[in-house]
Image (cartoon, rainbow, N blue to C red):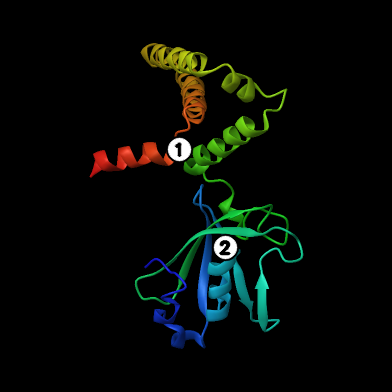
Amino acid sequence: MLVTNHNIDSLSWDKMDNLVPAIVQHADTGNVLMQGYMSQEALSATLSNNKATFFSRSKQRLWQKGESSGNTLDVVRVVADCDLDSLLILARPHGPTCHLGTDSCFPEQDIADKNFLAYLEQVIQSRKNDKPEDSYTAKLLASGTKRCAQKVGEEGVEVALAAATNDRDELLNECADLFYHSLVLLAEQNVDLKEVMKVLQSRHQ
């Protein structure tokens, strides 16, 4: 269930002394960032200002993530599970989420291999916005559609040649180049990777 300020009361608050566990997941990469607890007041504050706010069981008060460190969580969406007794918070972090200085409170949640494309997409978008002078990505994006598309074509041919010659190492390297340049072309065309994933999902169905 998508949670809004209008249906907070429908959650199963009575199961855990008016608190529900809330798992925070990176809205873009899917990585699990942290787990906390929310009261009705904390959830209402979260939905009102789009900043993840929890109830601290040790301090017995509300606390907004990053209120002292500045490492806030911008909430994109809040959903409840099927039993209405736990929450999934999709958010975009500003800085490390964990107080130990890591991206996630779960050590094993370093960028998962299959999630790396989403992370790389973010890096490419930052290069597009910031345009650092020493960035190959920024220079490629500035060269325009024709050059970005040409690079994808070149890498596609090199992938095929590597496969045809059974050169595994070369195939891995060329596939990496193809994926990267495809993401650059998508960024140049203002296409989100999620849009491509939706096409793949629709074909699978």
Which residue lies at the image location 49% right of the left edge and 51% below the top edge? Answer: 30
Alpha carbon distance from label 1 to label 2: 22 Å
Type of amino acid at the residue the image marks with label 1: Asp
Of the numbered discs 1 and 2, the one sitting upstream in the chain is 2
Q: Residue placed at 59% from the left, 19% from the top? A: 140
Q: Position of residue 119 (x, y in %)?
A: 55, 41
Residue 95 numbered mark, or none: none
Relative height, residue 134 to residue 119 (above, below)? above
Q: Mark 2 points at which residue?
A: 50
Q: Is mark 2 on a helix, strand or loop?
A: loop
Residue on which the image places disc 1 = 192
- Residue drawn at x 47%, y 69% is 87
Q: In which quarter of the image is the C terminus?
A: top left
Number of marks in picture: 2
Which residue occupies the extreme left position in the image? Answer: 205
Instruction: Categorize mark 1 by other alpha carbons within 10 Å: few (<14), some (14-19), many (20+).
Output: few
Give the quadrant of residue 196. top left
Q: Which quarter of the figure has residue 141?
A: top right
Residue 154 at x, y percent in the picture: 46, 12
Q: Which of 8 and 200 is in front in this view?
A: 8
138 or 97: nearer the viewer: 138
- Depth check, front residue: 192 or 169: 192
Is residue 39 something one can see in this rendering?
no
Q: Which of 16 and 55 is in front in this view?
A: 55
Above or below, comparing residue 147 to residue 181 in the picture: above
**How far across and down, in percent of the image, does residue 158 sit?**
44, 13
- In this rendering, position of residue 155 left or right of residue 143: left
Q: Is mark 1 on a helix, strand or loop?
A: loop
Q: Looking at this view, name the residue that lies furthest to the right.
A: 68
